[in-house]
Amino acid sequence: MNIKNIGHSMKYEAECIAMLFFPDEKIVTTEYPADEEEHEELLVQQEQKEQKEQKAPVEDCIETRLQNGLMKVTLSLDGKQTSLCRTILSEPHSPYEKAEFVMSDMIYTLLSQATGIHPAWGMVTGVRPVKLFHRRLDEGKTPQMVAREFEQHFYVTQEKIELALETARHEAPILREVTDDTFSLYISIPFCPSRCSYCSFVSHDITSKRAKDILPVYVDRLCEELEQISQKVKGTGLRLTTVYFGGGTPTILSPEQLDQICCAVEQHFDLSQLKEYTVEAGRPDTIDEEKLRVLRRHNISRISINPQTLDDEVLQKIGRRHTARQVIDCFEMARRMGFDNINMDLIAGLPGDSVEGFCKTVDKVIALQPENVTVHTLSIKRSASYGESWEERRKALEQAQQVGQMVSYAQKQLMQSGWMPYYLYKQRNTLGNLENTGYCKPGCEGRYNIYIMDETQTILAAGAGAVTKLCSNREGKLERIFNYKYPFEYVEQFDEVLKRKDRVVDFFEENRPLPLRKD
């Protein structure tokens, strides 16, 4: 899909809307200056040209033209052209009268009419839609007012509005606990026993010799980085509230390696005010009693055992080297060993899965009664299912509709069975522009998940691919520090990794100097 912007530079806004309808196509945007003196003449010429070439094939294109306060959007799709024109007010009284919104609304309207696609989240394209709801509720608007706004101006369905409002309601008390002197610790283990076919994360198959060889060195460097981070924290007054081992699959580590990292955390950080300690145990083919004993010994309070699906055929197709029975056995073993806060991840839209098959998986997970269930929507890769022909797009639309049924079923069944939505986010290129939602039993919210999505708490992160987020709510600032993406870079450039962390101290001195704690 090509986009031509004439007389303005609102590239990002136009591309975001176009990607809702063509998530797997390359969007190419070209910007042209506009000559205001020739405004009327150009519009007339354009209209005459369109009339003359109505029968001629026209390339798929979105043309947006802003001149003399007039916005015109023309959609050329499958040989047909449609247009809309609206006046841009010089002094808009609301955000919905500004040029960016007017143009986005026009593009969305034309594409929705032409394709028959009506995304459940409407024009909402951001990763963190619940933040938009929080913002309006914090301004004093009632839930009814917020619901009406998102329905009328953003075209969000009632189902998604209710989901977002319910999520915001459950997040609010936990977010109110966040202060500028608290932080979370993220520990990255970017290794897996095998790579799933759908995976887009930076994760390395441990079966390769190179990954096997670097893993012990990686663990040593990781522990060293944790020590250095703890030194940066001292004197700032920051209090650690959650620890999160993510990946990859952290339980790919040996019991000794898990113990080594957990000991480093205990040695270098004050855990006296810790409210949550999570380890993504992840795949059942990496979990055994010895590893679970290590986690219990270090007081890990929350683990994940993630099947993605409980259909053996689908598991095989996506490259998971375990069975549904192994997932259940692993879950029951964790229960016997005393783990009373377990999360299970599911993915809607996996290759080979069906609406019926996914619904059966949801029912089986509900029967297991984990404290947390996270329902993800498959994020599609380029050249996966969408193509350039309209027939291929229609097939993709049908697939998105099926995934929508999966997600809706999970939401309905979980909420009716006692789970509540407590955090929500969206990824780019998900089927149907749908969401990922975490559900939990009352009182079992995954705090780290809420913090990382709301971006209101400092996250200090260690390991390859880890991103530190420095937050000052008082000053309204958010700053990121990136570690090297791959384990091999991380190890080889470790001095630079540590050097970048010097920014932690500077940030707090500049934005919110905290008093020294009296221990």
Image: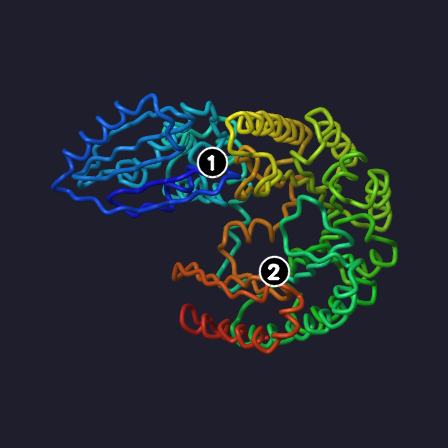
Residue 132 visible from this viewpoint = yes
Front position among marks 2 and 1: 1
Label disc, if present, on residue 420 of the rendered structure: none
Indicate which disc, 2 or 1, sits on the residue closer to the N terminus. 1
Residue 250 screen position, x and y as percent = 73, 58
Q: Which residue is most to the front?
A: 56
Please name the residue that numbered disc 1 is placed on. 20
Residue 498 screen position, x and y as percent = 58, 75
Please name the residue that numbered disc 2 is placed on. 241
Q: SS of the residue at dot 1? A: helix
The span from disc 2 to disc 1 (Cα, nearest Å) is 37 Å
Q: Quadrant of the C terminus?
A: bottom right
Query: Which residue is at the front of the view, 195 or 483?
Result: 195
Residue 214, quarter of the rendered image: bottom right
Please give the name of the residue rendered at 62% of the width and 49% of the height, measured from the top-left corner. Answer: 200
Q: SS of the residue at dot 2? A: strand
Residue 517 screen position, x and y as percent = 54, 73
Number of residues whose C-alpha sits closer than 10 Å to that of mark 1, classed few (under 14), some (14–19) or many (20 or more) = many
Side of 57 where 297 appears, left or right: right
Residue 4 lies, with reference to residue 273, above or below; the image says above
The amino acid pointed to by label 2 is Thr
Please give the name of the residue rendered at 81% of the width and 48% of the height, measured from the top-left corner. Answer: 284
